[in-house]
Every structure is written in structure tokens, then in C-alpha cells.
Image (cartoon, rainbow, N blue to C red):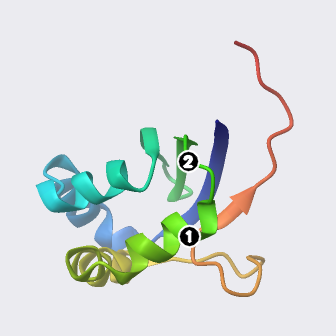
Amino acid sequence: MERKGMVIGLRPEKIAEYKRLHAAVWPDVLAMISACNIRNYSIFLKEPENVLFSFFEYHGSDFAADMAKMAADPTTQEWWAVCMPCQQPLDTRKDGEWWAEMEEVFFHA
């Protein structure tokens, strides 16, 4: 199992919409997240900086393949098309990233 932390900005004028969307995530999107071996997935918002932090546990054996499977799903693509205009990627993210991956520097179980 791997733990993943990621961060992205949230456009101030889209905060209410983003919260509304995530209060009722589409069931097929949730099913795909689970099918791609993601568990204990949370997204946190830090205001007034408007930064989203996501955390999840990956329980699979091929993260890249599972993320490709998710990206190929038409319903997930529709969901992303609704959510992505709310988000503001960090200028410092790596090439190919939308959400910037973070290094885990501490864990206590």
C-alpha cells in the first residue's frame, strides 16, 4: 500500500461549485476510483489560500496502469471536464501533472 498526497489551487469564484460537486460525486466516478485500487480518499480545502490537498491510499500493484484505466473511462472524463475549470494547477508542478504530487516526509500509524 502506498499513501499519496497531492495539491492544486482552487479558483476563488469556484469554491461553492467545487464543494457542491464533491458533496454528491457521481456514483460511477466513485466506482471507478475504487476499481483503480484507491481507498481512503479525501480532499481538504485551505482557505483563504484556496489550496486543495488530496490524500489517498493506493492498494494496487501498478499505479500508472490504474491511472491510465481511470483516465480512459468516459464518465471520469466527463467528471474531470466539470471539475477542472474550478482548479488552478500550481506553476511548480512537474510536466504532465495536473495535481502536483507531494513527497511524504512523515507518517505515524
Residue 103 horizontal/vertical position (percent): 81, 50
Residue 90 horizontal/vertical position (percent): 66, 75
The amino acid pointed to by label 2 is Gly
Quadrant for the C terminus in the image: top right
Q: Give the quadrant of residue 87.
A: bottom left
Can see residue 11? no
Mark 1, residue position? 65
Quadrant for the N terminus in the image: top right
Residue 72 horizontal/vertical position (percent): 37, 82
Of the pair 39 and 99, the residue shown nearer to us: 39
Mark 2, residue position? 60
Q: Give the quadrant of residue 82.
A: bottom left
The amino acid pointed to by label 1 is Ala
Structural crowding at the residue carrying mark 1, measured as other residues with C-alpha within 10 Å and reported as few (<14), some (14–19) or many (≥20): few
Residue 89 horizontal/vertical position (percent): 58, 77
- In the rendered view, tell whether residue 71 sits above or below residue 105: below
